[in-house]
Every structure is written in C-alpha cells, then in structure tokens.
Image: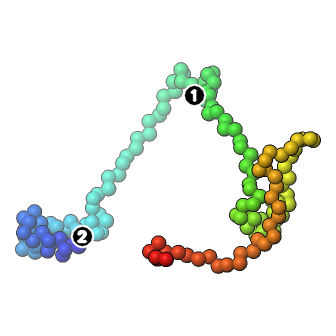
Amino acid sequence: MEILIKAKQRDNTQFQFLNKDSPLHGYYTALTALVKAGKWPEKKIEVVEDKPQEMNEDYLHPSLAATIIESAPSIPSIHYKPSADCDYTLLISKMRGEATLDEVYTPELAPGEVAPPGTEPLPPRVNTEITRAPVMYNKNDQA
C-alpha cells in the first residue's frame, strides 16, 4: 500500500516523507514500527476513584414509589388456525408423522348452526407426493 501511495503522490510535497531521501523518513519508519508493535497510540490508564455514596434520606427508589406506573396495554391474542390445504402444513405434518389437519380439525358448531360459506373442510388429498424435481429458471433465458 505504501508503494502505491508513493507512486501516486510522487509530486505531492506532503507525501515526501515516504522517500528515503527526506529528513522526515526516519520519523515515519519509527512511527510505523511502533504502530506495528502495538505500542502507539499509547493507551492511557484510567484511574477510577471510588467515591463513597452519600445516603440521602429523602431518596426513594422508583420501584418503591406509591404512584402506580401504567404498563403497556396487553395485545389480544389471535387464535391462528392453519389452513388444512396448506402444502407447508402437510409437509411438516408428514415429516413429524402427525395426522394431517384434514383428519384432526373439525369446526366447532353449535347444534343447528350452519358453517359459513367457504369454511367447509376440504376433501382429503389423493396424492400428496412430489412427482417432479424443482426447476430453476434464469431471468436472462428468453423462451
């Protein structure tokens, strides 16, 4: 890196210390040696003085204060029902050896209540096996 800077800044007077003929070259080499040795910049040792804390009789920790601190409002929980026909759910269930959601999930209806349209359970899948290998397409391919 030094050689590159030396070549590019050949005519710049502020970089003449890189030349061995310069009177500042000795200082530069001594400074780079200190940096490589980890001795420069000098690390100052901070002296921490332990002050005895003065006990103030009027001080009261916030957790002991009589005022009630409002907590954040609770977020209502939303009961997630995974889709019975979701490929991901079927794959995970098959890997775990669990029954599929088609076999387990039945909607809870009151006696005489009719399920809303579109919420009827789907018929079980006949073939859930993957028959083809995945294909990767390139953006640059023109069909």
Q: Is residue 71 above or below residue 95?
A: above
Query: For the N terminus, which image quadrant?
Result: bottom left
The answer to which image quadrant residue 23 occupies is: bottom left
Question: Residue 58's x, y, as percent?
Answer: 53, 20
Mark 2 is on which residue type?
A: Ala
- Which label belongs to residue 138? none
**Dot placed on the residue nearer the N-terminal end, 2 or 1:** 2
Mark 1 is on which residue type?
A: Pro
Q: Which residue is drawn at the image coordinates 16% and 67% (left, top)?
A: 28
Would you say 84 lies left or right of 47 here?
Answer: right
Q: Which residue is drawn at the image coordinates 40% and 41% (left, top)?
A: 49
The answer to which image quadrant residue 73 occupies is: top right
Would you say 34 lies left or right of 64 here?
Answer: left
Q: Which residue is drawn at the image coordinates 75% and 60% (left, top)?
A: 85
- Which label belongs to residue 33? 2
Q: Which residue is drawn at the image coordinates 69% and 38% (left, top)?
A: 76
Element carrying mark 1 = helix
